[in-house]
Structure formats: structure tokens, C-alpha cells
Amino acid sequence: MPILNITDASFDGNLKLYYQKVREDVFPVITPLFAQFQKFKAGGPRNMRWGGKGAVFDVVVADPTGWHWSQNGNLPESQFRDEVQGNVGVRRMYIRQQFDKLAVTGTTSRNAAYITLAQKIDEEVRMKFKLGVQEGLHGDGRGVKATISAVGSTTQIDVANPYGIAGGGQGALWIQRNALIAVRDSTGATLRGRAVVSTVALQTAPDLYRLTLASAIAGMQAGDIVVSASNVDDSFNAVINGLINITNRGGSFADLHGISAATWQRWNNVRMVAGTDTPRPEQLLESDLVELTMRVAARSGKNAMENPDEFLFVTTPGLKKSFIEAVQGQRQLTLAQTSKTLNGGYAANASCNGVAILDDPYCPVGTVYLLHLPSLGWVDAQDFGQVEYEGASAWRWVADRDAYETSSSIFFNVATTMRNAHGLITGYTDTFRYSPLAA
């Protein structure tokens, strides 16, 4: 059987439109959470103006004044409400995929070869983008996968605290075997080194994991952070905005989009602590969600009681289970009464006062978010597509192997135009670990 030869031009001609279809049909709904973000664009429902330094938008940050009651007909003082300009720069995300020539030459039919190859690459691209975007959405823009809790040697470390959140869940939630990682000091300023992860093993249930590295990294200490890496750099401070910094978790992220909540109080959002602002830290109650909803409504004017379809609760599967257990004895509802259909066709089979509850296994443990969907969105500077260089094909031969590789990229970020329309509760006792790491 003759070997099927496929030229660069054939690759480009047969797969270019297929990749465009991935961008249009797959990426915006690649995860249930990201599917709820609308695209901000000039002339759109939430207008964004793109410039060379990022997308910009105006935010009114001062309280309204200028009314007065007078029996004598005296006018009130004239006041100007302060406006500030928010901006959001883009982050660059890359996917690199290698495939053996056997995937192409496994049939004498050129069309069949293209279909097989296209399906193979599509499956890989879907999964990598899904995980990459999901990790970014739950983070804080720094790209922290975990923190080091103990150092056994230059090739053995114990990790905990996904996203850098103390008690946030399983330490290896975002660390995979064979992944290239970088270790930095706790501030991120000092790079300790890079290494490939050889093994990932549970050290102390349920959240402490032990990593064995393929090469030594000297100088690692407890409290250091772990981020993803390439052979020449790493992802520290290079990731999209996530729910942690958007909701100013712990009060540690006052600045967002160039606007400071310390300067402009109205730009801040509602933050509650389970057991302090709620009756019971060991269980998510319906009254907790009502309290969060009412506080957000009072602060922002965006009321989930009046417009439940504009809001979404996001929490862990364990806390959603806790909520269902808390309310199941109080009322009897059919699935049709509690189920809500979200953007992207995803179904949420639990709700509170009409607001859907989305359970997400990558949500930090013990956390509940209330998100105002119309004020959340994403902007991009470059559509998803293949990485090409002038005069070179997007399909490259892998040195010393009978294989090819291709790379894809997108330049984008997520933003909120009304930070005080969101809220969160942290600190619940969440004993369940429904995640890819669960046994």
C-alpha cells in the first residue's frame, strides 16, 4: 500500500475551516461556567471599546446626589457624579498538539485521513481549552496551581491549597503527571526553577498531595507557589481574571480593571463568611443564599428576586448536595419545577428562588458565588486560530520523529462592568471532594 503524502497546502485547505468552526461553535460553551459569560464588544449589549492597550469602559463610582425639597422653590446644589475608566488587557493562551504520522497514513483515502486527523485534534483541543479556561476562571489572574506545604527533597514536595487559597481543596487539583511546572517564592518574585512532574500521589487525605519531580529544583520552601511553565517562561501573572479577584475574595484584590475599591467604595462587592454571617458553617442553607441575594441587591440595585434569570449561584458539588439535603424536607418539587436551562444548553437541576445553582468540581472548597451574568463577559484581541509564522506553515515536523505538531492560540480576558453586583460566601465546612482526583 503506498504511503499517503499530504502537503502543507492540503493541511491548510482541508482543516482551516474546521478550526474556524471550533472557534465559533465550541469555545464559547466549552464549560458550563464560561458559557454564561457573554462577549463584550463595541456596539454590543455591554459596550466595550478595544484599544491598543486593552478594552476600556466607563464606571460611575459616586453616589447620586442633586435632589432637594423646598417650599421656597430653591434648587439643589449642582453635583457631578464621578466616573472612572476601567480597562482590561488580554492574556495569551496557547495550545500545542502533537500527532503521529500514523494518524494520517492509516488509510489510503485522503478524505478519510483528514476526518480522522480532524477528529483527533478536535478532541485534544476541546479538552485542553476546557481545562485551561476552567482553571483561569476559578483563579485570580496569578496562575497559582497550589502552594508547597512541605519540602522533602529537591525532587519531592507536598502541595495543598489550589489557587493559593488556604483550605481551598485538593492540592493536586490542577497538577497533572508529565506536566511542566515552575516553582516561585510565595510572592512570585523569585523563580526557583522548572521541572516535569513524574508522579502525583495522595499524601494525607483529602487534600495533601505529594509530587515527585523528574529533575531537581534547589531552594524550594514551604509557602512557595506552583504555576504552569514552558521551557523558557511560566504563567505567573499571565492568566485571565478569575472569580477570586473579580469578587475580591478575602479583600486581597481591591484593584480590578484599574479601579480601586479602596478609593471607590461602590466598586467593591459583598463578601460573607459562613458561621459569622450565616447561622451554620457546616451546611449551606436556603436562608444563606437569600441573605447573600438581598445584600447584593441592596448594594448594587441588581435584584435576583426580581430577575432570577440574570443571576447564577456557583458552588461545589458537595455544598450543592448540602443545600438539597437542607431543603428536601421542607417542600416537594418536581424536577421540572427546580431545573433551569443555562446558556449553552446546560441544565442546573437545583435553584433557590428561581436562581439556578451550578455545581462545579473546580470551585474552591467551601465557597458559594452569586454572579450577575449581564455584567460578566469576555473580550478578545485575536480569535482562536492556529499559530502561524510568516512564510511557514501552521503544521510543523517534529525533529527526529515521524510526527507533526500544530499550535493554536487566543488572546482574551474576562471582565465585569459592575463589580458590586456579585457576591460570595466562604468558609463552609465542605467534606466532599467530587473532582477528577476523587477515588
Image (cartoon, rainbow, N blue to C red):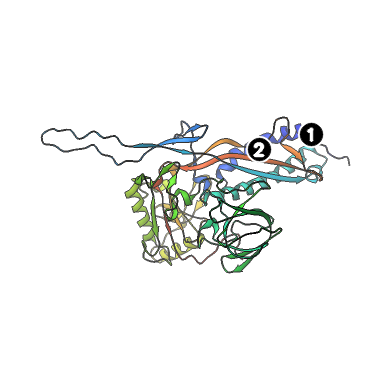
Q: Is residue 217 visible?
A: yes
The residue where tag 1 is placed is 7
Which residue: 39% across, 65% down?
275
Above or below, 305 against 329 in this view is above
Disc 2 and disc 1: Cα gap in Å? 18 Å
Residue type pointed to by label 1: Thr
Residue type pointed to by label 2: Tyr
Percent position (x, y) of residue 368? 45, 57
Kindly state the secondary structure of the residue where label 2 is placed: helix
**Count of numbered circles on the image:** 2
In the drawing, does residue 214 fall left or right of residue 294? right
The residue where tag 2 is placed is 19
Looking at the picture, tell me which residue is in the foreground, 363 or 191.
191
Which residue: 37% across, 55% down?
292
Check the image and name the residue furthest to the right.
1
Could you say which disc has been placed on residue 310 in the image? none
Q: Residues within 10 Å of mark 2 (few under 14, many from 20)?
A: many
Kindly state the secondary structure of the residue where label 1 is placed: loop
Of label 2 and label 1, which has the lower sequence position?
1
Q: Quadrant of the C terminus?
A: bottom right
- Quarter of the rendering containing residue 310: top left
Q: Quadrant of the N terminus?
A: top right
Looking at the picture, tell me which residue is in the foreground, 399 or 30.
399
Percent position (x, y) of residue 208? 58, 66
